Amino acid sequence: AQTVTQSQPEMSVQEAETVTLSCTYDTSESDYYLFWYKQPPSRQMILVIRQEAYKQQNATENRFSVNFQKAAKSFSLKISDSQLGDAAMYFCAYRNSYGKLTFGQGTILTVHP
Amino acid sequence: NAGVTQTPKFRILKIGQSMTLQCTQDMNHNYMYWYRQDPGMGLKLIYYSVGAGITDKGEVPNGYNVSRSTTEDFPLRLELAAPSQTSVYFCASSYQGRTNTEAFFGQGTRLTVV
């Protein structure tokens, strides 16, 4: 069974600083897809970044980047130059090659001005 | 494009009643999903489908049923509603290829069972 674990229920960061959110997953597959989603209080699910397991290069999207360690089954999200609008619940997600998409428990990120 | 559309947005059910949550997508995605999210918690997979006529159970399927007769629609049926089914329900869809693999979500349905 595929499982996704986010070991940090809550994290906080000062505005303009950098924060890293952790995610590990359990799988026996070699072909899969990983995602980070952001959920603000509006409940809307917003894609932050995605990573295909067949790509060795870590994905980046502006201030957001990932550290994908395939052997360690680790997929952390780094947010640089944190902004007040980054405050939200962040979810790590894993999709296998057959389409099953599983989410972690979430990390609440607080940004202090 | 409308994306993923869920109806209704809110609903109050009495214990023992039944209802269907509707979900439709206009992106021609093969993969569709239903999740529930309890307050302050993550998304738990109820059922998913990899194409018309194909459905499979997720982590928490008990008390729910689904069908997928078309690519566009993936309704979720609640039979004999129970207070434990009070939650926010999300429908999502995604492309089945090896790129652009992210899921697109509906706005959610807040269901209360009293």
Image (cartoon, grey):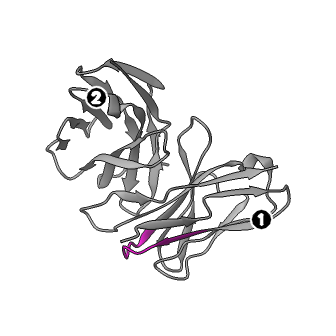
Q: Residue at x 31, y 35 (%)?
A: A74
At 50% from the left edge and 49% from the top edge, which residue is drawn?
A1
Q: How far from the left and from the top, in percent, is residue A102? A: 46, 49
Residue located at (50% from left, 82% from top): B70
The crowding category of the residue bearing disc 1, from other C-alpha atoms within 10 Å (few below 14, some 14 to 19, many at least 20), is some
Residue on which disc 1 sits: B79
Front-most of B49 and A54?
B49
Q: Amino acid at mark 1?
A: Glu
Vertical placement of residue A34 versus B107, above or below: above
Q: Farthest residue toward the left?
A: A57
Is B83 on the left-hand or right-hand side of A112?
A: right
Query: In the rendered view of the protein, which quadrant contains the C terminus of chain A?
Result: top left
Instruction: Give how far apart the Cα atoms at labels 1 and 2 are.
Output: 44 Å
Residue B56, placed above or below residue A57 = below
Element type where label 2 sits in the image: loop
* Mark 2: amino acid: Gln
Q: Residue A76 at what x, y percent from top left?
A: 30, 33
Q: Nearer the viewer, mark 1 or mark 2?
A: 2
Kindly identify which residue carries mark 2. Answer: A83
Q: Which residues are magenta?
A: B22-31
What's the chain of the residue with tag 1?
A: B
**Labels 1 & 2 near each other (Cβ < 8 A):** no
